[in-house]
Image (cartoon, rainbow, N blue to C red):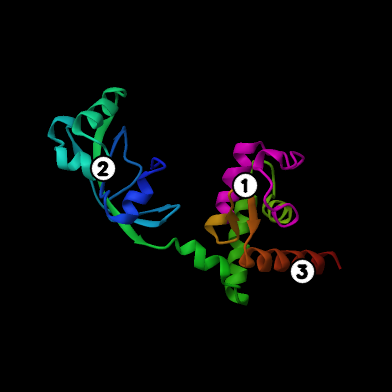
Amino acid sequence: MLLKQETPKGIQSGAITLAFRRWRRPTVKSGGTLLTAIGQLAIAAVDVVSVDEITEAESSAAGFSSLDALRSEFSKRTGGDVFRVRLSLAGPDPRIALRQEIPEDEEADMILGRLARLDSRGATGPWTSRVLTLLRDRPEVRAGDLPTDMGMDKTSFKVNARKLKGLGLTESLGVGYRLSPRGEAVLGRMQDEDNRRST
């Protein structure tokens, strides 16, 4: 679920507690969470509603200046149902703390196993070690400016970088990415294993 740029600040302050979306199928579920720039959001409820049922107070709680502004937004799109999403800030993004954690042997083996599975499903072949190495060597470089000799387009590269971020191995910056301390440790472990195999 994408949020408008100003919405996270409203959620953080408590001014915004609702979101309305038109979906064919909801992308969040009751009891779930959503990671955002301000932290982890808790999704308390996801309900189908009619636009005519939405109140002025609810439009305000969703960050709209008026009920008419909300209705105008939904008149631009057709298809699917309108969903009311009740949300709140649950806490910090757990990946932030994870980035600082250097894995012990058992956890490192588990991470390497997950990376091996990502490699086995990669459309361009094994990629995790190459992407981690690239981000270590070229931090804070726009994804579009990174070398294309990896056989990935910009979109695929960003999707893959997000997969690594989900494991706490990379950090998104204002421009580009960098390895986290956890990512540095895992890449070192990968390289040690590669060296052992080659000797």
Above-or-below relation of 90 to 16? below
* Residues at marks 2 and 1, CA–CA distance in whole angstroms: 30 Å
Q: Earlier in the sequence, mark 3 or mark 1?
A: 1
Residue type, numbered disc 1: Val
Above-or-below relation of 166 to 192? above
Judging by the rendered image, the residue that carries numbered circle 3 is 192
Residue 62 disc label: 2
Q: Position of residue 109 (x, y in %)?
A: 62, 69
Q: What's the magenta region?
A: 135-164
| Mark 3 Cα shell of 10 Å, populated few (<14), some (14-19), many (≥20) | few
Residue 26, visible in the rendered structure: yes
Residue 154 figure quarter: top right
Judging by the rendered image, the residue that carries numbered circle 1 is 175
Residue 62 figure quarter: top left
Query: Residue drawn at (68%, 65%), measured in percent from left and top?
Result: 184
Above-or-below relation of 26 to 103? above
Q: Earlier in the sequence, mark 2 or mark 1?
A: 2
Query: Residue drawn at (84%, 64%), measured in percent from left and top?
Result: 198
Residue 47, visible in the rendered structure: no
* Camera-side residue of 16 and 125: 16
Quadrant housing the C terminus: bottom right
* Residues at marks 3 and 2, CA–CA distance in whole angstroms: 51 Å
